[in-house]
C-alpha cells in the first residue's frame, strides 16, 4: 500500500490536559476515494490561527470520532483519482476545497472533525470542490476558504455593511488584513484599523484603511469619533481578545454593531450596559462562511476586484509544519498567511 506524509494532531485521551497534544509528521496510507468523493493531490495548504488553537488546546474538535486528525482546512490542489461513479469532476481539475461539509444537521470542519490537507493527498466530497481558474496560483487560492471567506461573510451577511458606513477593524492579521480589503471593496468609509504592531498598521493602510491606530493610544476613542463624525456603524473583532471587545464597544455609534469573528473561550463582557441598551447597540457572533461565498470570491479574484498575492507571507515545505505553526503563533515577520507545500 502506498503511503504519504501527513501532519497529524494527536489529541490524546479527552480526559488529559490539552497541553499533552502534539503535532507529528506521520507516514500514513494514501486514502482511497469512495462514492461521491475524489482524491486530491494537495498543492498548497494554509496555516491558520485556528490550527494553532487546536494544537494549544484552546479549540477542541467536537465531531471527530477518534483522537488523531490531519490538520488543514485551507486546501487547494488537483483532482488525482475519482471515486466509484463520480461524474462531477475529472482528473486534473484545479480546485480549492470548501473548509467543511454538511452531514445531516451537522457541519463537519475539514482538518478538525475529519482529515484535512496538511498532507500530500486528501479526500474531498465532490460537492466541496470549487473550480480554480488557471491564472490563480494554488498558494493564493488555498486560504480563500476561511482567511478570506470568513471576513467576507462577516462583512456582508452578519454585519450587513452598507456603502458609506464607518467601520473599525481590530486585528490586522490573517482575517483582518483581508477584512480591510473587502470593506474597501464594498464601499465602507471610513475604515479604521486598530493593531498594536506598527507593521500591521502600515499594512492596513496599504490594503485600504483610511486610518490606523494603536490600541494603547489613550485618545483612540476621540480619534475614532473625530474621523467618523459620531462613531462606528460596525466594529469587527478579528483578534478574539476581551480588551478588544471592550474598546470596540466604546467606539460604536448609536445602533452600532460589534461583530465577533476572532475565537476565544473567554467570557463576553460589556462595561456600561445601560448606555449600550440606551444607544440600542448590538453584539453579533460570527463563524465561518457559506459554500457560495468561496465560489463568489474566486470569481471576484478572476475579475481582479481583490488581490491575494500580498497575503502569502511564506511558502514552506510540509515537513516544516511545526516551524510554520510557531512562526504564526509568535508573529514572526508579521505574517498574513504561511502556506505549506507538500
Image (tube, rainbow, N blue to C red):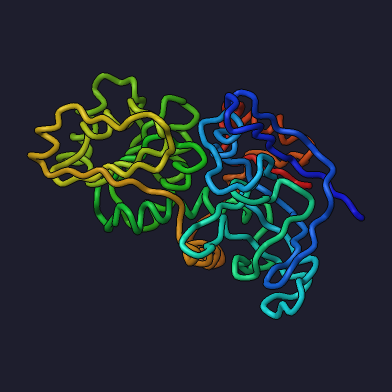
Which residue does the image show at 69% across and 41% down from the upper left? 68
Q: Residue furthest right?
A: 1
Asked whether 17 or 301 is in front, the reply is 17
Image position, residue 17 (x, y; %): 58, 24
Task: Give the mark count.
Answer: 0
Q: Quadrant of residue 88?
A: bottom right
Residue 245 placement, left or right of 150? left
Residue 257 placement, left or right of 64? left
Q: Quadrant of residue 23?
A: top right
Q: Residue furthest left?
A: 278
Q: Is residue 304 visible?
A: no
Image position, residue 143 (x, y; %): 59, 51
Residue 279 placement, left or right of 31? left
Which residue does the image show at 84% across and 51% down from the upper left? 29
* 122, above or below 242, in the image: below
Asked whether 133 or 322 is in front, the reply is 322
Asked whether 309 or 72 is in front, the reply is 72
Image position, residue 222 (x, y; %): 19, 28
User: Which of the image's four quarters has the N terminus?
Assistant: bottom right
Which residue does the image show at 76% across and 48% down from the upper left? 119
Q: Is residue 196 visible?
A: yes
Image position, residue 36 (x, y; %): 67, 72
Amino acid at each position: 500500500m502506498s503511503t504519504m506524509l501527513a501532519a497529524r494532531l494527536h489529541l490524546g485521551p479527552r480526559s488529559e490536559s490539552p497541553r499533552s497534544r502534539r503535532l507529528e509528521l506521520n507516514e500514513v496510507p494514501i486514502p482511497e476515494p469512495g462514492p461521491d468523493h475524489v482524491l486530491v493531490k494537495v498543492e498548497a495548504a494554509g496555516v491558520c490561527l485556528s490550527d494553532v488553537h487546536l494544537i494549544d488546546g484552546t479549540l477542541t474538535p467536537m465531531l471527530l470520532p477518534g483522537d488523531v486528525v490531519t490538520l488543514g482546512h485551507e486546501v487547494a490542489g488537483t483532482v488525482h483519482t475519482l471515486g466509484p461513479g463520480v461524474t462531477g469532476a475529472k482528473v486534473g481539475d484545479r480546485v480549492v476545497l470548501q473548509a467543511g461539509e454538511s452531514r445531516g444537521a451537522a457541519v463537519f470542519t475539514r482538518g478538525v472533525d475529519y482529515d484535512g490537507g496538511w498532507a500530500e493527498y486528501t479526500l474531498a466530497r465532490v460537492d466541496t470542490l470549487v473550480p480554480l481558474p488557471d491564472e490563480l496560483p494554488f498558494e493564493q487560492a488555498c486560504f480563500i476558504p476561511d482567511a478570506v471567506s470568513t471576513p467576507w461573510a462577516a462583512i456582508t451577511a452578519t454585519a450587513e455593511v452598507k456603502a458609506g458606513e464607518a467601520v473599525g477593524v481590530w486585528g490586522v492579521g490573517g482575517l483582518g488584513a483581508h477584512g480591510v480589503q473587502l470593506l474597501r471593496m464594498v464601499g465602507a468609509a471610513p475604515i479604521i484599523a486598530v493593531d498594536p504592531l506598527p507593521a500591521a498598521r502600515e499594512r492596513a493602510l496599504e490594503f485600504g484603511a483610511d486610518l490606523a491606530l494603536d490600541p494603547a493610544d489613550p485618545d483612540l476613542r476621540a480619534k475614532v469619533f473625530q474621523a467618523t463624525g459620531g462613531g462606528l456603524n460596525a466594529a469587527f473583532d478579528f483578534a478574539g481578545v476581551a480588551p478588544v471587545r471592550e474598546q470596540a464597544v466604546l467606539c460604536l455609534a448609536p445602533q452600532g454593531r460589534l461583530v465577533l469573528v476572532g475565537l476565544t473561550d473567554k467570557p463576553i463582557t460589556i462595561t456600561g450596559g445601560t448606555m449600550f441598551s440606551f444607544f440600542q447597540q448590538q453584539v453579533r457572533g460570527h463563524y465561518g462562511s457559506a459554500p457560495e461565498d468561496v465560489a463568489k470570491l474566486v470569481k471576484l479574484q478572476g475579475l481582479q476586484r481583490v488581490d491575494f498575492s500580498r497575503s502569502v507571507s511564506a511558502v514552506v515545505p510540509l515537513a516544516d509544519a511545526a516551524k510554520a505553526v510557531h512562526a504564526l503563533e509568535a508573529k514572526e515577520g508579521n505574517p498574513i498567511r504561511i502556506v505549506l507545500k507538500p
